[in-house]
Amino acid sequence: MQAKAASISSKAEEYLEAIYRLERKRGFAKTVELSRNLNVVPGSVTNTIEGLERRGLVTHEPYRGVKLTEKGRKLALDVLRRHRLAERLLTDVLHLDWSEVHEPACRLEHAITADIVKPLEKILGHPKTCPHGNPIPTACGGILEEKSEPLVNLDPGESGIIAKITDGKADVLQRLAALGIAPGVRVEIEEKSSFRGRITIRVGEESSALEYKVVSKIHVKRTGRRMRG
């Protein structure tokens, strides 16, 4: 699988990874979302998708979006594996802050070749997740998701342990890190406003109001009890 991944361009790898992430959320990856996520013009997305489709890596349904084929999914998981191992390298070895490694890892993942992956994984201690708590795909293309749910599902007074943060944008991660929000931290819902409005959460003794879309990217293991009496 890794040898096949090396036969496609870094641009194609970026597209496959982005399609995988969007497909996991919505079932399809819409071209407008790919354009926004990859910071490229819609016409460029269309041309690249056509190329991926010719290679049998994706299928494109008008008015719905793009889906990975089985071949495309294997390659996407290989890219994701290298990306998340790169994030571990940057945090565990180079000691960069976990909130700042997503974008450097996007560049580094393309330089991690098949002969480097296994030694890298070994020196890192065979990590199961990236620094943000998301699972690292196995060499065989498997991905084991730990049971968790979006923090927005919890009611006021309920708490959970943060399992993962699914947003990779540096500004979002740095904002959460500044609030003490990270994998392994206990967080409580204090207050919810109107539908999809701001949500007040509590970490330790500090409370913060965050937008619904930000809180929805935080996944927790529900504890079923209040943090305070």
Image: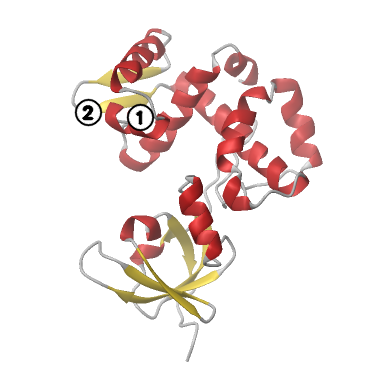
The residue at 52%/82% (across/down) is 205
Tell me if I can see residue 144 in this picture.
yes
Q: Residue furthest left?
A: 63
> Is residue 119 shown left or right of residue 129?
right
Q: Position of residue 37 (x, y in %)?
A: 39, 34
The residue at 25%/61% (across/down) is 196
The residue at 37%/25% (across/down) is 40
Query: Around disc 2, counting alpha carbons within 10 Å, would you say few (fewer than 14), some (14 to 19), or many (20 or more)?
Result: few
Q: Residue furthest bottom?
A: 229
Identity of the amino acid at label 2? Arg
> Is residue 39 shown left or right of residue 82?
left
Tell me if I can see residue 165 in this picture.
no
Query: Around disc 1, counting alpha carbons within 10 Å, would you say few (fewer than 14), some (14 to 19), or many (20 or more)?
Result: many
Q: Secondary structure at mark 2?
A: loop
Q: Which mark is residue 34?
A: 1
The residue at 70%/42% (across/down) is 90
> Is residue 84 shown left or right of residue 172?
right
The mark total stands at 2
**Which quarter of the image is occupied by the N terminus?**
top right
Q: Position of residue 97 (x, y in %)?
A: 65, 52
Identity of the amino acid at label 1? Leu
Q: Nearer the viewer, residue 100 or 74?
A: 100
Q: Nearer the viewer, residue 95 or 31?
A: 95
Which residue was labeled with disc 2?
64
Relative height, residue 200 to residue 118 (above, below): below
Relative height, residue 146 to residue 50 (above, below): below
Instruction: Give the foreground label among 1 and 2.
Output: 1
Relative height, residue 122 to residue 186 (above, below): above
How far is mark 1 from mark 2, CA to CA?
13 Å
The quadrant holding residue 23 is top left
